[in-house]
Image (cartoon, helix red, strand yellow):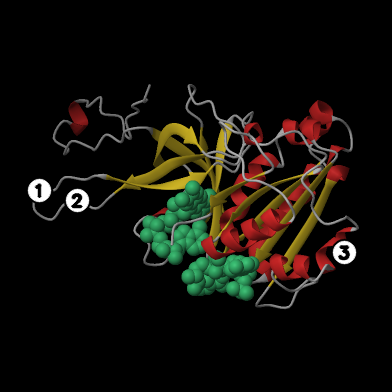
Amino acid sequence: MTEMTPVTDTNANAADAEAPKKMVLPDAQTVTAVRHWTDRLFSFRVTRPASLRFRSGEFVMIGLMGDPHPETGKQKPLLRAYSIASPSWDEELEFYSIKVQDGPLTSKLQHIKVGDQIILRPKPVGTLVHDALLPGKRIWFFATGTGFAPFASLLREPQTYEDYDEVIITHTCREAGELQYGAELIESLKDDELLNEVIGEGFWKKIKYYPTTTREESAKMGRITDLMRSGEAFADLGVEPLNAETDRAMICGNLAFNLELKEMLEDYGLEEGANSDPKHYVVEKAFLD
Ligand SMILES: Cc1cc2nc3c(=O)[nH]c(=O)nc-3n(C[C@H](O)[C@H](O)[C@H](O)COP(=O)(O)OP(=O)(O)OC[C@H]3O[C@@H](n4cnc5c(N)ncnc54)[C@H](O)[C@@H]3O)c2cc1C
Ligand SMILES: NC(=O)c1ccc[n+]([C@@H]2O[C@H](COP(=O)([O-])OP(=O)(O)OC[C@H]3O[C@@H](n4cnc5c(N)ncnc54)[C@H](OP(=O)(O)O)[C@@H]3O)[C@@H](O)[C@H]2O)c1
């Protein structure tokens, strides 16, 4: 059921009886933390609706009220798809967002502060879920840009480590600063007492992290697709190329990246799965183009 939470206290008392009626925001959640990573990227946390259940890797629609209609003054919710970056067990919800300067939503969303409210439609969906994959030995998470978000959830999901012996996360961005959210998150897993207790001490040693940049100098340069084609990525990681018997994969990036990598995985013999038909890999767009 959809929750309705008022944005503001509408229990008018004598003092504010004259004040104009304040808007009621449907499905409101309160911002509890905001962090800006670059001039194009930020992350934030919000309260979680008590009724919301989701699988790590899924996305929901979130947003703000749009501008009032010039004639009627009516406002409509302005919603966009967002991967939930926090794991399914977390008490709050985390999101990792782009800032598009003329973007209808993110031109405003980038200014949210602790205590503000956003709209969150509690209907999680998505293909980047463990249920869509057959059992395997090694899982690959392939991301570009904000496509890291669903993997921020899955890297903190106990099932990821229960199901696989090895977890490889690749993240390709234009600039080094765009890798920081992911790098810090992965580093923080080492000291995460709860996860080390629940999953097992040293669970994070299963992770192999492979960040690359394409337009700014960093420790590893190049698109992950090119680095796989040349064999450099496999040599760096000390693993064999993917095969359908042992390897499972999830892809989340821009459309061209998704299509190119999908074709490569098919060449390795992997087949695309779905919730209703689990196979070897799954794909989701990081944004619509
Ligand atoms: C399944 C799904 C999950 C998504 N999850 C996330 C998420 O976790 N974090 C997130 O920031 N966005 C995510 N998006 C994109 C998001 O829905 C919005 O497009 C984004 O918030 C920008 O909204 P906007 O209204 O400001 O601009 P829009 O009008 O939506 O987009 C304007 C343009 O900005 C570019 N753009 C949009 N989103 C991105 C992005 N994420 N990275 C780089 N360029 C982009 C595109 O060129 C687009 O045409 C997701 C999209 C889909 C389909
Ligand atoms: N990132 C920025 O600094 C920046 C700044 C201003 C505006 N923008 C705009 O924002 C939008 C999104 O930019 P973004 O950087 O977030 O995302 P993006 O363009 O999707 O690029 C993210 C990363 O994916 C790589 N990539 C793209 N296609 C690929 C493919 N087919 N195979 C493998 N890797 C691939 C890119 O490498 P390549 O670099 O080789 O393409 C880049 O490293 C673009 O329209 C861009 O013009 C971005």
Alpha-carbon span between mark 1 and mark 2: 8 Å
| Residue 80 locus on image (x, y percent) | 40, 48
Q: Nearer the viewer, mark 2 or mark 3?
A: 3
Q: Is mark 3 within 8 Å of ligand 2?
A: no
Residue displayed at 55% across by 65% down: 256
Q: Which residue is mark 1?
A: 72
Q: How many marks are shown on the rendered structure?
A: 3
Marks 2/3 in contact by CB < 8 Å: the verdict is no
Marks 1/2 in contact by CB < 8 Å: the verdict is yes
Residue displayed at 24% across by 44% down: 76
Give whichever of 284, 78 is nearer the camera: 284
Q: Is mark 1 within 8 Å of ligand 1?
A: no
Q: Is mark 2 within 8 Å of ligand 1?
A: no
Q: Determine the residue located farthest toward the left in the rendered image.
A: 71
Mark 3: which secondary structure?
helix
In which of the image's four quarters is ligand 2 placed?
bottom right
Q: Which mark is residue 68?
A: 2
Q: Is residue 34 visible?
A: no
Q: Is residue 281 left or right of residue 188?
A: left
| Residue 174 locus on image (x, y percent) | 63, 71
Q: In the rendered view, tell whether residue 1 sits above or below residue 254.
A: above
In which quadrant of the rendered view does residue 138 lie? Answer: top right
What is the three-letter code of the residue carrying label 1? Thr
Alpha-carbon span between mark 1 and mark 3: 60 Å
Q: Is residue 213 left or right of residue 231?
A: left
What is the three-letter code of the residue carrying label 3? Asp
| Residue 196 locus on image (x, y percent) | 83, 33
What is the three-letter code of the residue carrying label 2? Pro
In which quadrant of the rendered view does residue 29 lie? Answer: top left
Quarter of the image with the N terminus is top left
